[in-house]
Image: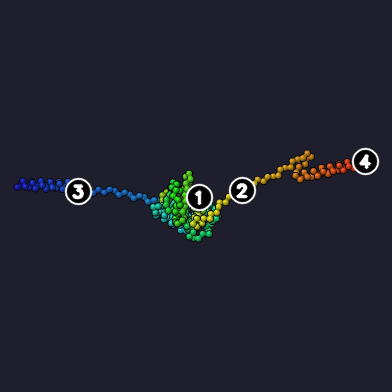
Amino acid sequence: MELPVICMLLLLSSSAAYAQKTKPPSPSFSPTPAPAPAPDFVNLTELLTVAGPFHTFLNYLQSTKVLETFQDQANKTEEGITIFVPKDSAFTALKKPSLSNLTADQLKSVILFHGLPHYYTLADFKNLSESGPIPTFAGGSYTLNFTDTSGSVHLTSGWSDTKVSSSVHSTDPVAVYQVDKVLLPEAIFGTDIPPTSAPAPAPAPDTAPAADAPTADGGSSSPGSAPEKSSSYRIISWGIWGHLVLAVSGGLALIL
């Protein structure tokens, strides 16, 4: 009786040991990577107000509602934005053509023309110079051409030919660069570009007339005095000859 009981106990213990050995391993979970930090929000109004003399351009951004377009592109897209900001003096120097003669839609297109729907560093413009015309926020034929000359970035829009004079802000996804001229698109102002006025010639220096050379009697020899002198000589000569003729005539009369 004891032997079957012992056998049963051994069988149960071996089954339990086997079950423990064949227990499936618990699944292992790898840690989830933390999400990348979101880029800092860029307030274009604050940036342009503090960064430099860009009040005129900022006023145009606000009045045309283009500020909202640029702001959304800067903070709600992965492409980012590049903005070319003219100084206040660039608008003051803009005499012809004038922005005051444009319609509301045309003025909005001019301001949109100052933005590219992508973030570009200064180094990126070297490749853009080989890519042909680059589209702007104005769309369509509103394009810009870039050239890189010894590290200096030049922009041309047909009417405007300027360069990037400084970097105001360049942190992905927003780049803001200062330019010296307002960018004027050919799509609005046409191709009849007025020639650059040549510089006025320098005025000829005032040359004072040469001083009259002093004469032997302390006078001055001027062009007007030469005829006077020759006339007096002529009168004296005729007087001498007249006296000689009279003297000879008188002598002959006495002899005869």
Task: Quote the CA–CA distance across marks 3 and 2.
Answer: 97 Å
Task: Quote the CA–CA distance across marks 3 and 4.
Answer: 174 Å
Mark 1 and 2 residues: CB-CB less than 8 Å, in contact?
Answer: no
Residue 28 percent across, percent down from the top left: 25, 48
Residue wearing tag 1: 162
Residue wearing tag 2: 201
Residue 252, disc: 4
Number of other residues with Cα within 10 Å of mark 4, as a class: few under 14, some 14 to 19, many 20 or more: few
Q: Quadrant of residue 70?
A: bottom left
Q: Is residue 248 left or right of residue 179?
A: right
Can residue 125 be seen here?
A: no
Residue wearing tag 3: 24
- Among numbered discs 3 and 4, the one appearing first in the sequence: 3
Compare residues 124 and 241 and report the one nearer the observer: 241
Mark 3 and 1 residues: CB-CB less than 8 Å, in contact?
Answer: no
Number of other residues with Cα within 10 Å of mark 2, as a class: few under 14, some 14 to 19, many 20 or more: few
- Among numbered discs 4 and 1, the one appearing first in the sequence: 1
Residue 241 percent across, percent down from the top left: 86, 42
Task: Quote the CA–CA distance across marks 3 and 1.
Answer: 72 Å
Compare residues 99 and 170 and report the one nearer the observer: 99
Question: Which residue corresponds to the image point at 95% horizontal and 40% vertical from the top-left?
Answer: 255
Q: Is residue 241 left or right of residue 101?
A: right
- Among numbered discs 1 and 2, the one appearing first in the sequence: 1
Q: Which mark is nearer the camera, 4 or 1?
A: 4
- Among numbered discs 3 and 1, the one appearing first in the sequence: 3
